[in-house]
Amino acid sequence: MAEQRARKGADSGADHDARPYVPHTDDLDELSRAAASCRGCPLHAAATQTVFGAGPRRARVVLVGEQPGDREDREGEPFVGPAGALLRRALAAAGLDESAVYFTNAVKHFKFTVPETGKRRIHKAPSLREMTACRPWLVAELASIRPELVVALGATAGRALFGGSFRVGDHRGLLEPLPADDGAEGEQVLPDARVLVTVHPSAVLRARDRDSAYRGLVADLRVAARALAD
Ligand code: URA
Ligand code: SF4
């Protein structure tokens, strides 16, 4: 009976959050390898693969997006689709060297729906529950890299770092300390770093006035570039 209960507990834990899958290490390669077999929430089932972060292990800046898109899901790398192309252009325009940046996402599996008509997979925003489930990976990446600056791209990244009531408009363009960790028990601890919030590059692609939205993103990223030059 006790054994049965324990097993039941372990099973439900397996679909509860990423903690049972995150190794206690600050070795980024080991984290990345372990993330490939994460079953911490239901999103792994329909997606092609885990899309872990990518970039230098000692990056001064970590950029946090929402979740991989269709292209990222197929290629296994973050920000290689249209939003990534726009983001990389904006980084260059702001004077941030892309090769010094680590790219990652708040959620590591692609969430999508397939409409009955057509085969194209349509991106679906992750729920707070999925963000919370996946957060141990993000915290482990940040604890391993210990960047000086974290750039949160949009509301999902912001919620993952600041909590569920986060709003982009309250933080956008400001340099703030990364909030003290109030994560789940057993999660690693967020490092001391500053955080800058801006919009998500996909929001720029969708904006009615794309040029002005793009200029806004670049202006925010310039704040990040200046912070690193200090
Ligand atoms: N959008 C994101 O938030 N992340 C990616 O990796 C790609 C698109
Ligand atoms: Fe694990 Fe995150 Fe993928 Fe869910 S989305 S299975 S928590 S890696």
Image: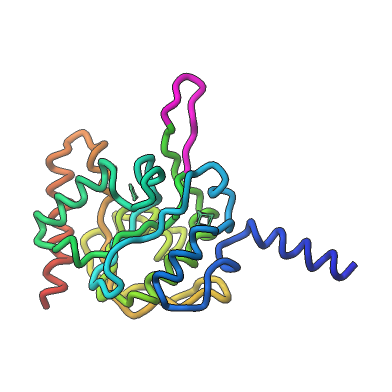
**Residue 205, percent across and down?**
24, 39
Residue 103 magenta:
no
Q: Position of residue 209 (x, y in %)?
A: 17, 36
In this view, the residue farthest toward the top is 117
Q: Position of residue 100 (x, y in %)?
A: 20, 67
Q: Quadrant for residue 69, please give it.
A: top left
Residue beneath the point at 47% across and 38% down? 112
Picture mark count: 0
Q: Quadrant of residue 97?
A: bottom left
On screen, residue 47 versus residue 102, left or right, reads right
Measuring 39% from the left and 48% from the top, which residue is drawn there?
A: 68
Q: Residue furthest right?
A: 1
Q: Identify the image quadrant of the C terminus.
A: bottom left
Examine the structure image and report whether residue 115 is included in the region drawn in magenta. Answer: yes
Residue 186 appears at what percent x and percent y?
Answer: 57, 76
User: Is 21 above or below relative to 77?
Assistant: below
Magenta region's main secondary structure? loop
Please give left or right for residue 168 compared with residue 86 in the image. Answer: right
Q: On the picture, is 126 further left or further right than 198?
A: right
Rendering colour mode: rainbow
Tell me what residue is drawn at x 15 percent, y 65 percent: 223
Query: Dividing the image into 4 quarters, which one contains the N terminus?
Result: bottom right
Q: Nearer the viewer, residue 72 or 15?
A: 72
Which residue is depicted at the point 37% across and 79% down?
191
In the image, residue 164 sits, relative to residue 75, either above or below, namely: below
Magenta region:
111-120
